[in-house]
Image (cartoon, helix red, strand yellow):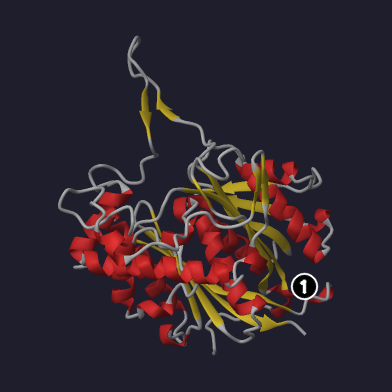
Amino acid sequence: MSYAYQPDEDWQPIVVAAYRTPIGRAFESLATVAAEDLLAPIIHRILSETAIAPEAIYDVLVGNAAGGGGNIGRLAALSAGLPVSVPGVAIDRQCGSGLEAIILAARLIQAKAGSCFLAGGVESVSTAPWRVDRPKANGALPRFYGRARFSPEAVGDPEMGIAAENVARQFAITRQRQDEFALRSHRLAVAAADAGIFQPEIVDISTGHGLVERDECPRPSTSLEALANLRPVFLRDGSVTAGNACPVNDGACLVLVMSRGMAKSMGIDKGLAFIDSAAAGVDPNLLGIGPVASTRKLLQRQPGLSLAAIDAIEFNEAFAAQVLASLDQLDIPTDAVNSNGGAIALGHPFGASGAILVTRLYTQLIREEAIGATGLAMIGIAGGLGLTALFEAVALS
């Protein structure tokens, strides 16, 4: 395949290691583990696997959406024992933050601004602080709120579930299709877990209650009948339920991105090459179809690219309605995405989810030795945004 942009080969960004924690349901298996302590074991694993000198890491880029602010990249780097000379930065593109961190690391390498980065994301909903509005008048009571604003009220800033209902109605996505897609996600994730497919990408997390080794949310007992019996959550006459939407989760994910030249000098023989990416905006009231706009923008940037020729597609499953609507608009068959299940089954730790998509591609294309194959990571983002990134499995020798 011929791509429109061919960087200086020595400065081509290559993902050479990719790991994640198990994904836990919020307030359950990982509830006592702070965000930086989810990231630190992954940093240790990547350093151990690659034998890279810690001081060679140019920066640590970490996405986060629901946390307490501050610089989680720096906090995680120091918590993991990296030298104080290694900086860190926090990135917030909400659900796309983890993927944005990886894209930014790749772009910095293309710009020759550094040759080695840790990049990814983390979310610990369980330990995130409460959000409280400051009272507007003396003596007034503070008000708790759930999330930041993503769009002005004049444009529309719906809650995520309402936005999913908007998409379902606008694009005629039936309740049955949503439930069938959710069942597919669980069945594929359960089968992948039983087959040990996730095991190579997971770093076990130690808690006060023991070792967490597996994703917590995939349900072997899920059936179409059980899903059909669930009531709509957001609208009385709606179609979005707890069964065809993702759960709320804790988890972390990091990849090591380095220049091709550095990777070859270290004797690394294969990796996931970053080719290109695109971000785009849509109506915030229909935020779930953001990946349609970002993918079409990427296709414009890469005129030789055909979606039908992509070997692996990972699409974040916040809601079945938005995945199905986006796939319909892009003419992508349902069976072409998320071959091992997605976030409806595995979970959606907001700031980490985009990086988890890349780690899933890394497992399918690098760990499974699919050199020459291509992969696409796609995610819809609060506020009406989409983010899509293109990768290729390459040999470095």
Q: Position of residue 38 (x, y in %)?
A: 64, 47
The answer to whether 164 appears left or right of 57 in the picture is left
Identify the element where label 1 is drawn: helix
- Front position in the image: 67 or 154: 67
Instruction: Tell me if residue 198 comes above or below residue 264 in the rendering.
Output: above
- Front position in the image: 86 or 394: 394
Q: Position of residue 319 (x, y in %)?
A: 34, 59
> Which residue is at a point 45% across and 63% down the rendered structure image?
220
Image quadrant for the N terminus? Answer: bottom right
Residue 245: tell me if it is visible.
yes
Q: Position of residue 298 (x, y in %)?
A: 44, 74
User: Given the current orientation, which residue lies at the most extreme bottom position?
Assistant: 1
Count of numbered marks: 1
User: Given the current orientation, which residue lies at the most extreme left position?
Assistant: 237
Instruction: Tell me if residue 103 comes above or below residue 7 in the rendering.
Output: above
> Which residue is at a point 31% across and 69% down the rendered structure image?
180
The answer to whether 314 appears left or right of 121 in the picture is left
> Which residue is at a point 78% across and 75% down the rendered structure image?
268
Q: Amino acid at mark 1?
A: Ala
Which residue carries the number 1 mark? Answer: 263
Q: Position of residue 77 (x, y in %)?
A: 72, 46
The answer to whether 355 appears left or right of 337 in the picture is right
> Which residue is at a point 79% across and 77% down the rendered structure image?
264
Res 21 → quadrant: bottom right
How dense is the environment of label 1, judged by Cα within 10 Å: few (below 14), some, or many (20 and up)?
A: many
Residue 7: tell me if it is visible.
no
